Image (tube, rainbow, N blue to C red):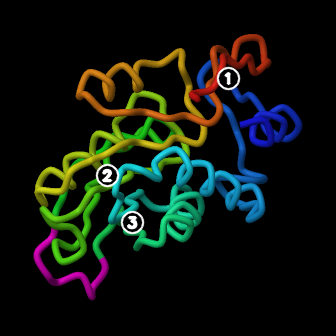
């Protein structure tokens, strides 16, 4: 997606071999116009997949997932990384390791928001080793929901996350695919069609 790649080139910062900082428009401060275009692009790609729910994980996946859900005309559900006092119903849970935070979190979604009747589009901000997406897939499987595809805003193609998800038989669509973050420079490969 040209607008996203241009924004990464302009405002993204490489913090090391594996870390790209996009906090001025994705992960801390959010550019709503860019997120709306991203959500519309995911909705366009998956428009024929009979999506009934868009699922993400808090926090940075919420904005693109919400715009995708709005465009598709379906609810957006996000997995929480910590249980609130009001979440006392039966929960779907999974463990997810975060590459950037170096911690394992238990994510959860209330069972009342996902069922075997749902066709799910998973949206996430980054794909690196695939653990966040894998955790969301596990939540969907626990509910009996069918995952129709995974939309990724930024993929670190030099890590093995895509391979993990594709081996599960899932369609992965990434809007910006990064080949390398070597020498402080972002190098892209062709995005998914």
From which residue to which does the magenta span run?
84-91
Q: Earlier in the sequence, mark 1 or mark 3?
A: 1
Q: Nearer the viewer, residue 139 or 12?
A: 139
Q: Nearer the viewer, residue 6 or 96?
A: 6
Local crowd size for mark 1, using a 10 Å CA cut-off: few (<14), some (14–19), many (≥20):
few
- CA distance for labels 3 and 2: 14 Å
Q: Residue furthest top?
A: 183
105 to 54, vertically: above or below: above
Main secondary structure found in the magenta portion: loop
Q: Which mark is residue 103?
A: none
Q: Quadrant of the C terminus?
A: top right
Q: Tag 2, which secondary structure?
A: strand
- CA distance for labels 1 and 3: 29 Å
91 to 30, vertically: above or below: below
Residue at point 31%, 45% (across, down): 148
Q: Position of residue 11 (x, y in %)?
A: 85, 41
Q: Is residue 168 left or right of residue 190?
A: left
Q: Earlier in the sequence, mark 3 or mark 2?
A: 3
> Picture quarter containing residue 179?
top right
Q: Earlier in the sequence, mark 1 or mark 2?
A: 1
Q: Is residue 62 left or right of residue 133?
A: right
Q: Look at discs 3 and 2 and give the one toward the viewer.
A: 3
Q: Nearer the viewer, residue 52 or 155?
A: 52
- CA distance for labels 1 and 2: 24 Å
Q: Is residue 187 left or right of residue 113?
A: right
According to the image, label 2 marks what residue?
A: 105
Q: Tag 1, which secondary structure?
A: strand
According to the image, label 1 marks what residue?
A: 16
């Amino acid at each position: 997606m040209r607008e996203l790649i241009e924004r990464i080139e302009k405002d993204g910062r490489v913090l090391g071999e594996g870390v790209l900082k996009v906090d001025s428009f994705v992960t801390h401060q959010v550019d709503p116009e860019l997120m709306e275009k991203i959500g519309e692009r995911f909705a366009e790609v998956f428009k024929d997949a009979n999506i009934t729910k868009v699922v993400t994980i808090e926090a940075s996946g919420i904005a693109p997932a919400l715009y995708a859900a709005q465009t598709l005309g379906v609810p957006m559900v996000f997995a929480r990384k910590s249980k609130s006092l009001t979440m006392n119903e039966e929960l779907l849970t999974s463990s997810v390791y975060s590459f950037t935070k170096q911690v394992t979190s238990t994510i959860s979604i209330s069972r009342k928001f996902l069922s075997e009747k749902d066709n799910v589009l998973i949206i996430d901000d980054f794909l690196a080793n695939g653990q966040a997406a894998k955790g969301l897939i596990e939540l969907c499987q626990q509910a009996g929901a069918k995952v129709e595809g995974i939309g990724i805003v930024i993929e670190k193609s030099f890590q093995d996350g895509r391979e993990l998800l594709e081996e599960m038989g899932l369609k992965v669509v990434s809007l910006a695919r990064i080949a390398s973050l070597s020498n402080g420079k972002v190098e892209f490969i062709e995005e998914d069609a």
